[in-house]
Amino acid sequence: MSDVELAVIGAGPAGLAAAREASSRGVAVTIVDDNPMPGGQYFRQAASDSLRRIAGNIFDESARGASLLGTVEHARVDYRPDSCALGFFESELSVVSGGRVTTFTPRCTVIAAGCTERPTPFPGWTLPGVIGAGSAQNLMKSQRVVPGKRILVGGNGPLNLLTASNLVRLGATVVAVVEAARDRQAWGRIPGLLIEPTILLRGLGYRARLMMAGVPFHSAHVVVEARGTDRVEEARIAPIGPTGKVDFARSRTLGVDTIVWGFGLVPATEKTRALGCQHVYQARKGGWMPARSALMETTRHNVFSVGDCAGIAGVEKALLEGRLAGLVAAQRLGRASDTDARRLNARLRARLVRLERFRHAIEAVYAPGLDTLSLVGEDTIVCRCEDVVAADLRAALNEGVSEANSLKAISRVSMGRCQGRNCLTTVAALIAEARGCRLDEVALPTPRPPMRPVNIGSLVADPKI
Amino acid sequence: MDDGKARGAPVRIIIDGEPWTAYAGETVAGALLAGERAHFRRTPARGQPRGYYYGMGVCWECALVVDGRPNVRACLTYVADGMRVETQDGDGPRGSLE
């Protein structure tokens, strides 16, 4: 067991910003991250020097973030890549790296665990060739690989636009972009969008690039089926009516080999949930997220949560929140003077308020206006690990099962190795549908250690697990 | 996007018995997808085809057999000379969760 001043979970934008702020003030920081290189998803680096030179001008995020990425080289930073936080035991944090478990007792903890893609099932979504939008981004950034020859980008949210634009820039044929939100929703939001002209221009640039490449853009449409034998061969798309109903009768079929599918992101809350922090539900920010003070502190003393794991809001917000938490942690550890901290704190928070107003406009522009459960057919797989289909879950719910833990026991839903990350949001929606209640009234199962599947050999040395 | 050579040093791997050229720094998933192979495994429960999906180590959809070990995530595993990659059927040859 070893004492550390500040443990940072996650080496993405928020975690690195926290680590940099704290270490620059003299705090000894341990960063735990499950990737081989720092940067998280946004600053994801090419996996080799040769790959970095391919299309380096397109994927310049990691170059722009170079000084932040350099945080891991700092003398006071103990950076642990390929490591994963397994669990929390009172004030101890267990981390597995290189097949060995280490236990820390951090005085302050910053959780910057990021997010996962919102699993949004539709018939055929498990076919090879249907991949997540973030995952397509990852493939392009780290491998400089495009996932197919004829690609449809579908779903909801700004990430799809960026992904489609990048696919075009790398030379892929994007057959269509299919967006659930209605284009005209943007008009009334222009004042809000103009708060951050740089971010707005970036977004318009993606759209312009798609137009110039002649990519058809279908607003208020959604993918209703993927068809194929051993991989995607066709995508069926349909318009969404003004009341949010999918007009299946007016569907049409496009020949594609890949569907890049993204329907927003979900904060990764398993760590704050395992720590017993209180959570609040905000649909527009991705669902459940830890309740926090203005200082980014959760309901547990000296445990902070920053970036997308505390509400989906993009990289700029993640950087600011990380910095703020790093500053507050330094102050708690006696490494920042109160006046100094107060001044910077006020500046960071003013900037966060502005970003939040911009974000509010973006959320309104992309409000999908569609109940995604209407895409789920009886035979649609909900739990990808255990191949549990919607009909099995709906039948159990009709027989009176009313909460996630019992549903797990009956159907094996969420009991596979993804530990529910592929299905729990859908399970919650099905429960809410059956009970006629709101999503925030459905409790999710408590995550238990190990929070990631781990080789049993790594655990036998640690009697606590 | 590129002519192959620019990708770096070639790495010889074997996929389902066939020789395959990958490049240093590629993951098994990257190498397969660059070669237009999307089908990585069949599920234990219903024998359905699956492939690369979320690409960050959490979804396990890309799990396949590497050098005889089943349930290796293609999205996290880097190619190495002589590596044998096989598509996985169900729980794989030993049925163990690595």
Image (tube, rainbow, N blue to C red):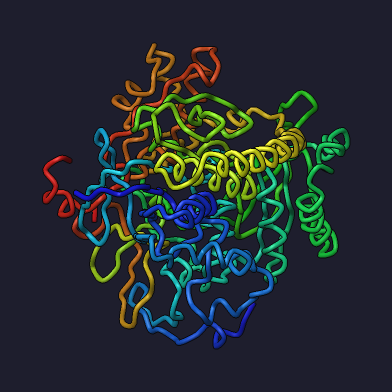
Q: Nearer the viewer, residue A34 or A21?
A: A21
> What residue lies at 33% left-to-right and 27% top-to-bottom?
A408
Residue A249 in view in this figure: no
Q: Position of residue B91 (x, y in %)?
A: 26, 52
Q: Is residue A333 left or right of residue A355?
A: left
Q: How many marks?
A: 0
Q: Position of residue A429 (x, y in %)?
A: 52, 25
Q: Is residue A283 left or right of residue A248?
A: left
Q: In the displayed structure, would residue A257 be above or below residue A347?
A: below
> What residue lies at 72% left-to-right and 26% top-to-bottom?
A245
Q: Is residue A318 left or right of residue A6?
A: right
Q: Position of residue A199 (x, y in %)?
A: 75, 51
Q: Nearer the viewer, residue A224 or A337?
A: A337
Residue A410 in view in this figure: yes
Report which quarter residue A349 is drawn in: top right
Q: In the displayed structure, would residue A263 be above or below residue A247?
A: below
Q: In the displayed structure, would residue A82 be above or below residue A419?
A: below
Q: In the displayed structure, would residue A115 be above or below residue A228?
A: above
Q: Position of residue A74 (x, y in %)?
A: 43, 65
Quadrant of image for the C terminus of chain A: top left
Q: Nearer the viewer, residue A67 or A131?
A: A67
> What residue lies at 58% left-to-right and 46% top-to-bottom?
A318
Q: Is residue B17 left or right of residue A138?
A: left
> What residue lies at 41% left-to-right and 69% top-to-bottom?
B28
